[in-house]
Image (spheres, helix red, strand yellow):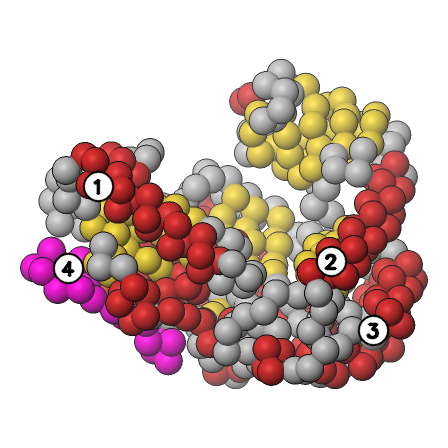
Amino acid sequence: MQNKTFYIRTYGCQMNESDSERIAGTLIDGGYSMVASADEADLVVLNTCSIREGAENKVYSDIGRLRLLQREAGATRTVAVAGCVAQQEGPALMARDRSVGLVFGSRAISRLPELIGRVEAGERVTAIDIHTRPDAPDSQVRGDPHRAWVTVMEGCDNHCAFCVVPATRGPEVSRHPDGVVAEVRELAERGYVEVTLLGQNVTSYGKNHGTDFADLLRRLHAIDGIRRIRYTTSHPKDFSDRLMDTLADCPKVARHLHLPLQSGSDRVLARMGRGYTYAAYRAKIERVRSLLPGLAITTDLIVGFPGETEADFSATLDAVREIGYFNLYGFKYSRRPGTLALTLDGHLDDDTRDQRLATLLAMQKATTLRHYQALVGSLVNVLVEGVSKRNTARLSGRLENGALAHFEGDPGWVGSFRQVRVTQASASALIGVAV
């Protein structure tokens, strides 16, 4: 694999962003060079997401554009599809479009040199075994010199009715804690100050190693140089008292908890197969808030799940009011192939789902604005991430609660923590003055 170029397009979640960094590192180790656009590349990798309806069509559309580009340029280009669409579609994807030479899953990244070699020899290759152990991140091209993704586990054993992750990412397998600690220690030595621990369900981390996420956090908290630790995603049924106590004992862990509720209706939660009631969820929120006053809590919610009545939707709105989330990610239910929800009765029309989502998001926007306005006049600690995309005279960074802040300052501050006095607030960001 000498003197070849590659381009990666990444769709979807933070896990995919991390996987793309690993793909890039593996390819560079194999002699490839990264380029800025697909038309310059000998190898184009589409690292895909299938969590939402229509994701497959978007990928096929991009493959079609690449095929047209290749025909117009008269070039020979390898197209590879990775990620969840690759895992979900597999051989069907290869059969549908012969311009795709390689389909591979996240647990085959370390095998890329071998797989690409087979493609270059004329073979069309599929490598999507979800039951192999996840690769150790031996090589990774980090997209940021100060903040890093660190995958601690992969897969999910929960099989929620709406979710394709168990089918596309496989069963839960955790990395050994010693490997995670070594990776984070090495990042600290290289000057990284923030790490985000990734997994489909980090709160169930460690089962195959006789440990748990609380123990891992305590070990990472002790590493000099790392000043902020984030993690995603958590499942309420695995969010234990022991983990809450650890969060309270470890100030480097960001005072931000993302705990997906999905619905405020017990009937809908049961149909989703979530494994908890709203009362049980609320009790966990109350306990963790008692340990960590001021904790910013965010969530995921799905509206329009099959069979959701007006009363069920009202229960979700009541839950949002009662908990007072700092922010939330709202989605309308998406039909996903192979999921239990697809077989349920009571599928709602698009207009109903759209209206419910708009109502939910409008309610939360007002709540988020109140949370942000409450910060006006306060002094906050911001990790400077870069120059603002909207106003190049300003810098941008995030508070530990996840809020975005813009302020004037020296570009040399990027990667450092700065005290900022908040002067203005909208529902999307804070404006302040560095002090």
The reply, left or right, for residue 317 in relation to residue 193 is right
What residue sits right under mark 2 in the picture?
Answer: 351
* Residues tagged 2 and 4 counted as in contact (Cβ below 8 A): no
Q: Distance between the residues labelled 3 and 1?
A: 49 Å
The reply, left or right, for residue 85 in relation to residue 219 is left
Q: Distance between the residues labelled 2 and 4?
A: 45 Å
Which amino acid does the dot numbered 3 rest on?
Answer: Thr
Q: How far apart are marks 3 and 4 (CA)?
A: 51 Å
Identify the residue at image location x=74%, y=83%: 270
Which amino acid does the dot numbered 4 rest on?
Answer: Val
Instruction: Point out residue 433 in the picture as x, y percentages from the top left corner.
Output: 76, 22
Is 124 magenta? The answer is yes
Task: Examine the rendering and report whether any part of residue 193 can be seen.
Answer: yes
- From the viewer's side, name the closer residue of 218 and 85: 85
Which amino acid does the dot numbered 1 rest on?
Answer: Gln
Q: Which residue lies furthest to the top in this view?
A: 393
- From the viewer's side, name the closer residue of 406 and 265: 265
Element carrying mark 4: helix
What segment carries the magenta color? 114-133
What residue sits right under mark 3 in the picture?
Answer: 309
Q: Is 411 located above or below residue 17 in the figure? A: above
The reply, left or right, for residue 218 in relation to residue 55 is right
Instruction: Point out residue 195 in the picture as x, y percentages from the top left corner.
Output: 54, 51
* Residues tagged 2 and 3 counted as in contact (Cβ below 8 A): no
Is 3 magenta? The answer is no
Decide which of tag 3 and tag 1 comes sooner along the chain: 1
What residue sits right under mark 1 in the picture?
Answer: 70
